[in-house]
Amino acid sequence: MGLRLQLLLFALALVMGVAALFWERPAVPPLSAAHRPIAIVGATVVHPSLHGAPKVEPDTTVLIIGDRISAVGPSSTVMPPPGAAVVDAHGKWIVPAYMDAHVHLYGSGDPYARPDVIDLTARMPWVKEALWSRDRAFLTLHIWLACGVTTLVDMGDQRWIFPLRRAVEHMPDVPRIFVTGQLISPVRREVLWEMGNISPMIFAATPQQARAGVREDVKAGADLIKFWMMAPFTELRKEKLLLEAAGREAHAAHRLFAVHACSLDKAKSALRAGADILAHSVLDLPIDDEFLSLAKKRDIAYIPTIYLARGVRAAIRHDWKPTPLESRLGDPEVVCRLLQYNKVAYDPSLVVHGDPVVQPLSPKVFIKTIAHNLRRVRDAGLTVALGTDSGYIGTIHGPSIFSEMDCMAKAGLTPAQVLAAATIGGARALHLENVLGDIQPGRYADLLILDADPLKSTANLSHIVSVMKGGTLFDRAALLRQIRQVTSTEAPCP
Ligand SMILES: [Zn+2]
């Protein structure tokens, strides 16, 4: 199918498919009646901390009224008000619900998600893939909730992300979403860029275009702005001018400025241009004192995205294997597509772009650098936030958060530090630590009940019994049943 025809079909489908975006949303019955106060009694509450040890409160009652936490204290002193629903959580742990600070809902994580990285459009036209992800958005969001994630930051997407964000604002059974809208990019990748308004990127060749792109995103409803530092080294000077223009415009509109900058010199340029969030690790070199002092001055959040390198390399080399949690919790259709692609013969000529993670550089080498840099960032007292880059090839929505947690632990973070990155770290990255990321009166009632000690082992962070989003409590098993009910009606994986 020619690109023009693909575009026409996509445009048509976009017009006709607005209703499809809000496909029959499976309603998951909550454990608690709406608007009735809830008291969760007897659990050990863990308050993650970005600096130092977490505060642990045994035998605690958490009282929730409406969508907020109203009181937290010893079960002997905090009494459930008359008429409250009482949830017995003795022997269990309560932690804030998780945030994934780096996802892309336009990508499914299957091998066809990024034809600019590996061109499989002959097998699956990108338009078809993109529409499929869009129409599957609610299922994907349910999967996220079942993985304990109540907040997502979409770090670059097609424009349907704006109506989706508005649609989910008051839905209890899907995560809240913060969006950058389309990425501002100084490089064109035809297969994605030629999509115009429905591309996940806005191409900017001049500082004026970069500023206009930021204004377009802000007008559409972007919560933050993302700039993609992907220009070749020969164009570094020009890229810097665009970066600075985008950063100034983002700040003028009171938006945080997130930057994809994976090399040490680009990351420093990003920090000098006002970056508030580094969306990935520095992976080419060990970070130095100059980087740390720039990062501290800007009080940035650092999102390591460690797991994605393994995921994409395995997928591209036809060797992708799901972890047990990915098998159990991931979208079965996406898992199936990745496994099916394993059976296709490896053709290196299909790898199109010089993404460092698909280069022959040994993953051991750069994962060692990523781990070293993460420890330095942590030791310097900077904010670390957890992000998976889910949607990218080989990194599937939902359970990849547990793979990322595992990678962070292997890089040297303690379970408490991983928990902090997945909760208060993300909240701090968005400057929302007053409303998200901890179990405190006044904050959104986004929390998880776990049946294993989250401070003993990072793996225990996946032992989720119940998920509460904005004061509505869901049984985790019921969420999973609901997801399975939808996916079991689909054709089985051949
Ligand atoms: Zn990304």
Image (cartoon, rainbow, N blue to C red):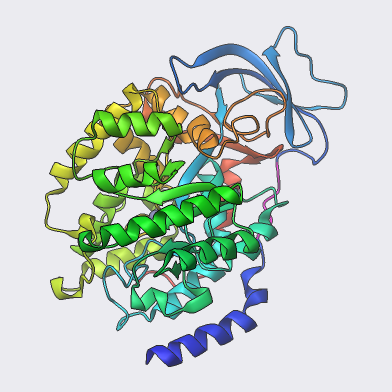
Could you tell me residue 135's position as x and y percent? 56, 70
Residue that appears at 50% across and 51% down? 248
Quadrant for ligand 1?
bottom left
Could you tell me residue 430's position as x and y percent? 55, 40
**Of 299 and 31, the residue lying toward us:** 299
Quarter of the view holding residue 207: bottom left
Could you tell me residue 59's position as x and y percent? 62, 12
Give the total of numbered labels: 0
Residue 74 falls left or right of residue 364 = right
Which image quarter holds the N terminus? bottom left
Reply above or below: 193 against 422. below
Reply above or below: 296 against 219. above
Which image quarter holds the C terminus? bottom left
Could you tell me residue 77's position as x and y percent? 75, 8
Residue 370 falls left or right of residue 19 = left
Query: What residue span does the magenta drawing correspond to?
Result: 26-30
Quarter of the view holding residue 486: bottom right
Residue 101 falls left or right of residue 79 = left
Reply above or below: 151 against 349. above
**Of 494 and 386, the residue lying toward us:** 386
Do we see residue 488 in this rendering?
no
Tell whether position 31 is magenta: no
Q: Residue most toward the top?
A: 76
Reply above or below: 313 against 287. below
**Of 187 and 388, the residue lying toward us:** 187
Quarter of the view holding residue 44: top right
Residue that appears at 43% across and 15% down? 52
Do we see residue 213 in this rendering?
yes
Residue that appears at 31% across and 67% down? 111
Tell whether position 28 is magenta: yes
Q: What is the magenta segment's predominant secondary structure?
A: loop
